[in-house]
Image (tube, helix red, strand yellow):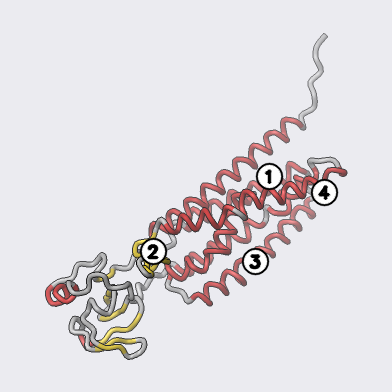
Amino acid sequence: MAGLNMRAISLLVFGSKYMEHVFNVPIWQSSMFIGIGVMLLSGVGCFLGGAVVSHFKMGRRGCLLFATGAMVLSTVSEGINMTMGCPNTRIAGLNLQLNGTLNTIACQCDGTDFLPVCGNDVTFFSPCHPGCQNSTGISYGGCAGVEGGAVVLGMCDTDCFKLYPFMALTVVYAVVGSFSIVPSYLVLIRSVSERDRTMAASIYGLAISLLAYIPGPVLYGKIIDTTCIVWRNLCGKRGACALYDIVEWRMKMAGTNVGLLVMSTLFAVLAYCVLTYKGRPAVAKSV
């Protein structure tokens, strides 16, 4: 279960940020999707998981099988999500070679802070790189390096079509993954004596906090920082990241999620094997 909780933490804490940078979605829209489309449906999945266990009157082994199946499906959906991302934007002045007049202009822009602008379907590192001379709010004019002489603030649209498949797979993960919550908890409760159930639930909550809720944000935050390409500087000190390698971010984040889910699934399979072995009737010894 720790793997599922770690994945939930990454989605809850960094999901909006991920969608903003990878799919260029406004932060309020991505937050609405995470809050309504994921968290709400996770509650629905938890209810459905409990309903299935109750309807079929599952014992401990049945609950473990059900929870393991849910974990396997969650792992598959997260693995597919590794392919649901956009390519890195080609930025003139960073990873896109400038030619002719633009190259001459860009030579005067060393040390310029990252402030992307779009003109002629090309994203420039800053208004300096296309040679812009003046600002008019969200646009810049007098740009000698682009047709029309004007650019707008922000990156150009990449026409990436994988946002909706990503959202669909994330919802599937949230619903199916939450199926395992109730059966996993029931296995815990049914595996200890009645007088020890309160303590078992307390230890379970403490373990989830120590293994998932506390280290989760730190681990994923560190992973995300390793994918930074351009850092902002404030008074000579490194500040927040201004631009990420979104392909590396996607692969590292999804790869970590898949690894944790596989680990959780293996522990569930091990628990099922132990439970099955202990449940076998004892074989009488021959005299």
The kind of secondary structure element at disc 2 is strand
Marks 4 and 3, the one that precedes in the sequence: 3
Cα separation between marks 1 and 3:
22 Å
Left or right: 36 with respect to 202? left
Disc 2 packing (10 Å; few <14; some 14–19; many ≥20): few
Count neighbours of disc 4 (C-alpha within 10 A) and say few if under 14, some if 14 to 19, many if 20 or more: few
Q: Which residue is mark 2?
A: 238
* Residue 41, label in figure: 3
Q: Is residue 35 left or right of residue 187?
A: left
The residue identified by callout 1 is 65
Rendering coords of residue 178 (x, y %):
66, 57
**In contact (CB < 8 Å): disc 1 and disc 2:** no
Report the residue at 55% width, 48% height from top: 260
Q: Is residue 251 above or below residue 21?
A: above
Instruction: Please state which of the two labelled residues, at mark 4 or mark 3, is closer to the viewer.
Output: 4
- Whichever of callouts 4 and 2 sits on the residue coming sooner in the sequence is 4
Q: Residue at x 55, y 72 (%)?
A: 31
Q: Which residue is mark 4?
A: 198
